Amino acid sequence: MSTNRSTFLTPAVGSAIKAFTLFEVTLAVAILALLTGVMLTMVEKTLETSALLEAEQQRLEQRQGIIDLLRITFRTLPNRTKMISRRVTDSSGNPEQQIVFANATDVLAWGSIDEVLHSSAILGAPSQVGGAVLLSIKRILPPDLDNTGTNTNSATIDYLSYIPDEGASGDTAQWLPLLDKLKLVQWRFFDPRTMTWLDDWTDSASRPTLAELTIQYVEETDPERYVFWLPPVTPNALPKFSASTTSSSSGSRTTNGGGNGNGGNGGGSGGNGSNSSGGTTPQR
C-alpha cells in the first residue's frame, strides 16, 4: 500500500503553530530591564553605604589617633618646655587660639635632630576656604643666637621671645594638618592655684593641671570635649642621666687625685692633684 509523505510533513488543516507575539516579547524585555535597573540601584546604594561607613570609620580612627597623640604630648611634656596660649589673627583675618610650646624638642616633632633641637611648636586652628577650621601643628626653628648656623642650648634663653607673631615676616613655617572639616576648636585651662577654668594661659613659669579641648565637626550638631593632664613644672630639675654622669665623673676625679698623691709625692701632692682635677671640672 502506497503512502503519501506529504501527509506527514504538512500540518492538518485548521491547526496553528503557537509563538510569542511582538507585544509579549516587548513586555518581557521591559520587565527584564526594570528588574535590572532595580538591582543596579540596590548594588549602587550598597556600595555608597559601604564607602560612607568606611570613610566614617577612617575618620573616627584618625580622630582617636590625634586625641591619643595630644594626650601623650601633654602627659610627657618636658620640664624645660614653656607653654602659653595666645590669641592671633590668621591669614584669612579670622580669630584663632593657639598653644605655644617653646624649647620643645620632643613635642610633636618630626625631621632630623638638628632641625628640632631647641625648636618650638605651635598648635593652632587656621581657617580654611568655606569657613571651616583645621587643627594643625607647625614648628618654629630655634634662634641662631651666635650667627654661625647653630643654636645654643643655654637654659637661660627665653625661647618664647624668639617666636614670631602670626603672619609676621619671620613666620615662614608651614602648617601640618591634623584634623579637618571643623567649625569649632576651643581650649580652656584649669588653674590649680585658683581652682578655676581659664580661657587663656599666659604664665610661662607654671602650667595648668588640665587642658580642655572642645571640637565640633561641620556636619555634626554636638561638640566633643577632651581633657588632658599636664605634669607640673619642677624648679631646677635635671634629667637623671645628667645627675648620674656628674656623680660618676666626680668619683673618677677623686680616685685619680688620690692615686697621684700615693705615687711618691706625699699627701700634699695628692691634695694638689685633687684640687687640680676639681679646677678643671666643666660647669654644667
Image (cartoon, rainbow, N blue to C red):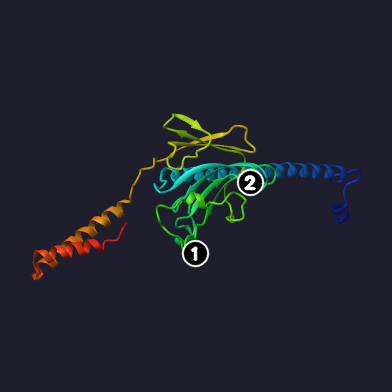
The x, y position of residue 218, in whole percent, is 64, 38
The x, y position of residue 223, in whole percent, is 58, 33
- Rendered position, 81 above or below 203: below
CA gap between label 2 and label 1 equals 30 Å
Q: Quadrant of residue 41?
A: top right
* Residue name at image x 13 percent, y 64 percent: 270
Q: Residues within 10 Å of mark 1 (few under 14, many from 20)?
A: few
- Rendered position, 193 above or below 258: above
Q: Is residue 175 visible?
A: yes
Q: Residues within 10 Å of mark 2 (few under 14, many from 20)?
A: some
Q: Quadrant of residue 57?
A: top right
Q: Which residue is mark 2?
A: 90
Give the side of residue 86 with respect to residue 32, left or right: left
Q: How many marks?
A: 2
Where disc 2 sits, the SS reads loop
Q: Nearer the viewer, residue 192 or 36?
A: 192
Q: Quadrant of the C terminus?
A: bottom left
Q: Nearer the viewer, residue 24 or 148?
A: 148
